[in-house]
Image: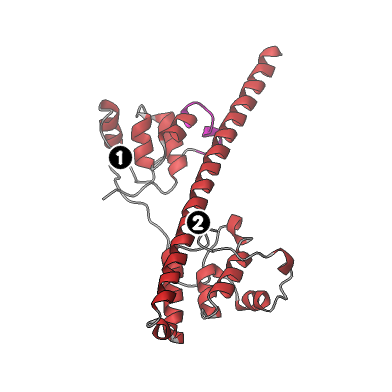
Amino acid sequence: MSQPTPLMPHATASWLVDNTALSFEQIAEFCGLHMLEVQAMADDLASSKYTGRDPVRAGELTMEEIEKGQQDPEYKLRMHKAPVTVSRTKGPRYTPVSKRQDKPDGIAWILRNHPEVSDAQIGKLIGTTRNTIAAIRERSHWNIANITPKDPVTLGLCSQRELDAIVAKAAKKAGIEEEGTGDENLVGDREALIEELRAEREAAAKAASEAAQEAEVAAWLEAKRAAEAESGGENGQ
């Protein structure tokens, strides 16, 4: 079983790069990052983005453990104390700011494809209010002209497991499963649709990952060029 990563992986990696002689591989594995990300920090392509966070002071790593890693490049650092994660038990589901504009699209998709799901279930899954759901259903939402139904899983608003769970629960409550048990063709069509949606989600996730990597590399290059330009200007003076 893999060990937990530091509470702030990038900031921790930045500190380890600047303050230890650990290898890129050791730092990357301990922080749960790609080795190229750590190498970029060492090359000053990305370190300016993060303020270093001391994992020793945070209790996540000990100096003895760091020394073991510095003496043996093959040594794998062990987490001293796992970071405390804060879990929310009440209140609406938290959605990152970058994802909030996608909520109406996800709500519209559920309303269109799974009308048996209640407003309360949608609100809990997406992290929205009943007023918003009602406005989208009644097409009175202020931005209804720009709302396009999109799979909330693809949008990153919820997991496939969470969506399947509420759909199954709503279908059972509505008696949809019992009505469809004798229709083998309907079951086959549903399975085919699920496979098709899963393939679309995987393709979308892969495309998003590739786009994020390209954007990150572009940001590193831009930061490097800016640093070189600034250094050249200072030398010219």
Number of marks in picture: 2
Task: Decide which of tag 2 and tag 1 comes sooner along the chain.
Answer: 1
Name the residue beneath numbered marker 2. Answer: 200
Is residue 209 located in the magenta-colored stretch of the structure?
Answer: no
Q: Is residue 94 visible?
A: yes
Relative horizontal placement of residue 147, taking residue 53 as reference (left or right): right
User: Residue 62's mark?
Assistant: 1
Q: Amino acid at mark 1?
A: Thr
Task: Find the magenta span and give its range.
Answer: 41-51
The residues bearing labels 2 and 1 have C-alpha atoms spaced at a distance of 45 Å
Query: Is 27 in front, or is 62?
Result: 27
Relative horizontal placement of residue 30, taking residue 205 as reference (left or right): left
Query: Is 179 in front, or is 53?
Result: 179
Query: Is 140 in front, or is 42?
Result: 140
Say few, some or many: other residues with alpha carbon within 10 Å of mark 2 (under 14 / 14 to 19 / 20 or more): some
Q: Amino acid at mark 2?
A: Glu
Q: Is residue 53 visible?
A: no
Question: Residue 108: image x %, image y %?
Answer: 61, 70
